[in-house]
Amino acid sequence: MDHSGLLHQKKGIIFGALNETSIAWAIAKSAHREGAQFALSNAPVAKRLGSLESLAKQVGSPVYWADATSNDDLKVLFEDLKKEYGKIDFIVHAIGMGINVRKRRTYDQLNHQWYAKSLDISAISLHRIVQLAMESEAMNPGGSILTISYIGAQRSFSHYSEMGDAKALLESIVRTWGPHLGKVGIRINSISQSPTRTTAGQGISGFDAMFEFGEKMSPLGNADADSCGDYAVTLLSDLTRMVTMQTLYHDGGFSSMGIGDGMIEPLMEMAQQHSSDLD
């Protein structure tokens, strides 16, 4: 995609890039292409699990290792960020992990300590980041805060388990912060993204089936990480300066579909097979 300078002179921070499959990684590449300057952040454990420093070299960004569930870490981060850039214009929160999901615990058998930790990492971390950014006066008026959700916040997907609750909480935090941020001229939104082949996504049992279902049901197919990065740029730019408190579906049309042609034929075959079995 051609450079258009949508984020020229914009400064910010992107949380959550781990490796080349990460949505945050794609957003960082798109933001860099559009002229933004930004820092990258992830938890210290990502030093050995991912390749964030490789991305940092590509886009010329500093890396701040911080646990997004730690107020102390975030306070230090925002003070360091102010020293690096002064006030910033955008924050991207692309953080999520379902511990029960990774350990194959079904929703009716959740470990509640893991459940609480999943909510803290995947949703409450957004509240912490926004609150501490405001307390440190880190953002300029007209700034944009963006997070990444999934339609599992609105609908039940059996194998998505606790992450459906986490994304529902995440979207609620976006809506509830909106009026408070609007008083200082800052907007906040979430992108509800298609199933995407990220490290986090691959940790979900049955992810391949979710991906294929989305691909068949969506008129445009699943939206990939790179296209999400391009869409994110518009929400960080001044073009969307009056958009706030929204969950915006970037899913190839999946969220508006009842049933698509891609599913009709397999279902007809199943119905015919069932009819034959009864005969």
Image (cartoon, rainbow, N blue to C red):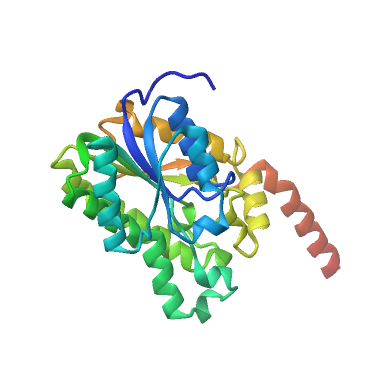
Q: Position of residue 140 (x, y in %)?
A: 20, 36
Position of residue 69 in the picture relative to residue 249 (left or right) = left
In the rendered image, the quadrant that contains the N terminus is top right
Residue 272 in the image: above or below residue 24: below
Q: Is residue 112 above or below residue 271?
A: below
Q: Residue 263: x, y in percent?
A: 68, 48
The residue depicted at 45 percent of the width and 59 percent of the height is: 44
Name the side, left or right, on which 55 lies relative to 116.
right
Image coordinates of residue 108 in percent, x first then y, are: 51, 79
Report the residue at 18% width, 49% height from top. Answer: 136
Is residue 36 something one can see in this rendering? yes
Q: Residue at x 64, y 44 (%)?
A: 215
Left or right: where 29 falls relative to 185: right
* Relative to 1, residue 145 above or below: below
Report if residue 229 is visible in the image.
no
- Picture quadrant of residue 115: bottom left
Quarter-of-image position of residue 238: top left
Labels in figure, total: 0
Closest to the observer, 94 or 263: 94
Residue 204 picture location, percent across and down: 60, 62
In-front residue for pair 95/110: 95
Vertical relation: 239 (above or below) 229: above
